[in-house]
Amino acid sequence: MKQRPLVLKVFLPILIILSAGGFWAGKQFIHSRLPGIEGTLTVPHVASETRIIRDRWGVPHIKAGSGDDAYFALGFTAAQDRLFQMELQRRLARGELAEILGPALLDVDKKFRTLMLRHRAEEYLARADRINPDALKFLDAFLNGINFFISRGPLPLEYTLLGTAPRPFTRLDVISMMGYVAYSFADGIKRDALYTILAARLSQADLDRIFPDYTKTNRVTVMQPQGVPPEQASSEPGTRDTTVAVPDDFTGFLASYQALLDKTAALCPPFTGSNSWVLAPERSTNGHALLANDPHIGIANPGVWYEAHVKYPGYENYGYHLPLLPFPMLAHNTTKAWAITMFENDDLDLYAETFHPADPSLVQFKGKWVRINTIEETIRIKGEDDITHIIRVTPHGPVISDFLKGYTGPPVSVSWVYHKLDNPILDVVYDVGRANTMAAFRSAVSRLAAPGLNFSYIDHSGNIGWWAAGRLPIHPAHVSGKMIHDGSSGRDEYIGYLPFDRNPQMENPENGMIITANNLSTMTPIYPIGILTGYFRPDDRAARIYELLAERDKWDMAGLKKIQTDTRLFSGLVMTRAILDT
């Protein structure tokens, strides 16, 4: 017992030294995996002097002698900052997560293989002659920058921990990821089953409380920011689709799909929620149009957006990119600025399918048996054998219920604008950054099929504008877009798609302001759809923004920043009174 103090005196310092040494070695190892952001590089791909200056926030400001060099530098900096995030995003969209993360992600891979994001991207890129050649050229320069960083490292620590290394990034990775963006905006795949189940169990009044019909109350819309009096609101009754299978059959579909949504959100935050407003020159203190945008989307680290400033002869934009996309989704320069929020239109529908009882390769469509398409794909799984995944594709689209564990109800397929129509999404994001007039900007966004986006715009000439972009399916009069439809009879099929010039939009409105906050676009009927339907968000944010903007005739940037940080809930007073009265 008397020897214990001596043992402590000898071994305690050794333990402390070893612990400190281990901590120091671990710290040095982690720091060795961080990319260097200072110095000079000689790069064979870059022809002109290209400078990357990072500000105190780490935002890269890129100035180059050509577009090729600028986008190479942007790809290089994006890889420095976000390489493993981009790895997860491309693998999520392509259905290849299990290859590096193991069998726990197999069901997520099956989901996105079945949604055919990679397949659709392959079809899009196979028609490269229809894509703007400059957009493809600059995309390739961006990818060269990413891959140059991969070739020289250091690679993020996550690759070492997983025992893997990144393969080169390709065009297919980028376009597949854009498909995931469109998917994350498509609320129908997440909500139509719930609406169908509840519609069978609740009265219309109770259903409307859970899924408010904003055409029946005094609501603030984008085109009517002051609100519409009840007597002017639509009195059209809600539509009920009575042609579907027994609603209880879809409970398992909803439960299984929600579990997959939760797992997906942990890997890549959903793209949900934003505000924007623009003010005409007569409403600003400096006589110029003003724009504010806060696309908050999902909170994550690293964030959804990648902020960068890119300048080369004939082009300059300071904006926010998706890490895998070289062109900004929202940005500003010396001549214009633009913002985005979610349109919240319904561009995806679910159909209950009937397969032939003796021949599973046949499905009933418009009262006849027709043959389905079948796609076989191989999914690699870390530590296990590869598997073959089979995708059944009906005239409506892929059967998404096939990958749901424990689901025994009717097969459910997805009919999605993203699958059905040409969607030159790369051209759209490329062209909006280069549009030099409001007409050119409108023309660019008019080509977008999916996802549905509100584009708000200002320019140095004093113009302000807003366009709800995205193609809107036209349903038969008896069909509610929020229900699971009958896929067999043909009664519930799309009639067509609304042309863009009938989409909600405004240019230089008389009141000098345009507010979008994922709320209903308009209460004015649109031919031949009637009252616009979708999964629009409550109008609380839009109403509060309008309330604040109405307090002054003229605004400056400092004032708009205060609006963005406003914390008052517009409906809070009503809710407080209701609570106190109970």
Image (spheres, rainbow, N blue to C red):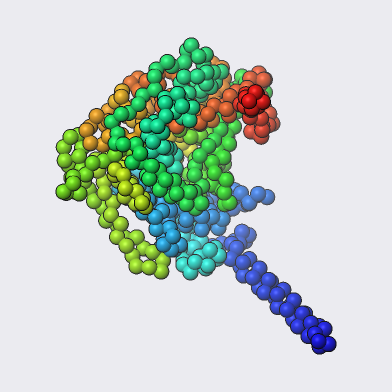
Where 275 sits versus 408, above or below? above
| Residue at 66% in and 18% down | 553
Which residue is at the front of the view, 29 or 200?
200
Which residue is at the front of the view, 575 or 384?
575
Picture quadrant of residue 245: top left
The residue most toward the bottom is 3
| Residue at 63% in and 20% down | 550
Which residue is at the front of the view, 249 or 525?
249
Where 520 sits versus 402, above or below? above
Can you see residue 232? yes
Count the marks: how many? 0
Please state if 330 lies on the left or on the right of 392 as rendered. Answer: right
Which residue is at the front of the view, 285 or 26?
26
Where 283 sits versus 194, above or below? above
Picture quadrant of residue 104: bottom left
| Residue at 38% in and 42% down | 251
Please state if 319 lies on the left or on the right of 126 as rendered. Answer: right
Q: Residue 73: x and y, percent? A: 52, 53
The residue most toward the top is 231
Q: Residue 292: x and y, percent? A: 59, 32
| Residue at 64% in and 33% down | 564
Q: Residue 166: x and y, percent? A: 45, 63
Can you see residue 153? no
Where 304 sits versus 460, above or below? below
Quick one: quadrant of the N terminus?
bottom right
Please state if 90 lies on the left or on the right of 580 as rendered. Answer: left
Quick one: quadrant of the C terminus?
top right
Q: Residue 252: x and y, percent? A: 38, 45
